[in-house]
Amino acid sequence: MTKSTTKRWTRLIAIMSIATLLSGVSAYNAPRIEAAPAATNTNASSYWDGFELYPNDGYDNGSNNTTTTNTVAAKMINLGDNYLGVKYKFGASTETTKVFDCSSFMHFLYMKQGIDLPRASYEQATVGKKVQRSELKKGDLLFFATGRRGKGKIAHVAMYAGNGKILHTFGKPGVTYSDLKDWDDTYVTARRIVNDDIIARAKSSMQRSGTPIKAS
C-alpha cells in the first residue's frame, strides 16, 4: 500500500469515526418514544374498549365535582342499553362482553365507572349500604334467591333502572329489562354502592393512575 493510499484510508476512518460519534449524540438527544405494550387480550369486545372514564371536567383544578350519583347511574344504565340481547352464559369471563352472567354484567357496568365490584352476586351483596325497597334509586343493586345456590341463598343480581324496572341478564333473553314485581318471590335485599365519596375516590384514582377502586 502506498503512502498516499494509507493517508486516504486514515482520513476515511477519521471521517467515519466523527460521523458515528455525531450520530450517537443525536440519538441520545432524541425524545424517547416508548413502544406500546403488547396486547394481553385479543378479544375485540374487551371490557376496556372505549374506556373513557371521567374526562377532565374541572375536578382536578379545584372546581365543583360535576359527576353526581345520578350521572353515574345514568351512565351505567345507558351503557347497559348498548348490550341488550347479548347472550347469557353462567360463569362468563370478566374479560369479555360477548356473553355475560348476572354478576359479570354488573361488574362490567360498575368497572366502567372506576368501581371494582366483587365477582359473584352473593359477594356483591356484601358491599355498599343496605337500602329498603321503598328507597330504591337508579343504579342500586338488587339481589335474589333463585335456587341455584340453595333455598334462600343469593344467586342473582340486577340493577334498578327506575319506574319499577330492573336491568339484568338471565336465560334466553340475555341482557334485558324486567318488571321488578315479576321477581317478588325471590327478592332478598338491595345495596347502594354509589355515593359522593366513592365517586370522588374513583374519579381521582382513574385520573391519576387509571386504577379502579374496590367497592366497599
Image (tube, rainbow, N blue to C red):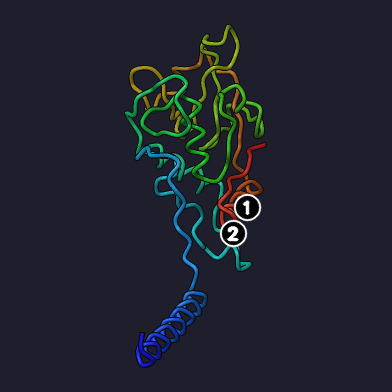
Task: Estimate how packed mark 2 is, as few (under 14), some (14 to 19) or many (20 or more) residues with alpha carbons within 10 Å.
Answer: some
Q: Which residue is mark 2?
A: 65
Relative to 205, is 73 above or below? above
Q: Amino acid at mark 2?
A: Asn
- Across and down, in percent, residue 67 comes to 54, 54
Q: Residue at x 38, y 22 (%)?
A: 88
Total numbered labels placed on residues in the image:
2
Residue toward you, 49 or 24: 24
Going by the picture, which residue comes out furthest to the bottom? 4
- Across and down, in percent, residue 164 comes to 46, 28
Q: Amino acid at mark 1?
A: Ala
Q: Residue at x 38, y 28 (%)?
A: 99
Quadrant in which the C terminus is drawn:
top right
User: In the visual, does 49 lie left or right of 210?
Assistant: left
User: In the visual, does 47 lie left or right of 128?
Assistant: left
- Across and down, in percent, residue 38 comes to 44, 48
Q: Which residue is mark 1?
A: 200
Mark 1 touching mark 2, by CB under 8 A? yes
> Mark 2 falls on what kind of element?
loop
Give the label, 1 or 2, closer to the camera.
1
Residue 165 at least partly seen? no
- Across and down, in percent, residue 89 comes to 40, 21
The quarter of the picture where residue 187 lies is top right
> Mark 1 falls on what kind of element?
helix
The quarter of the picture where residue 13 lies is bottom left
Q: Residue at x 61, y 30 (%)?
A: 191
User: In the visual, does 174 lie left or right of 192?
Assistant: left
Relative to 64, is 121 above or below? above
Relative to 17, is 178 above or below? above
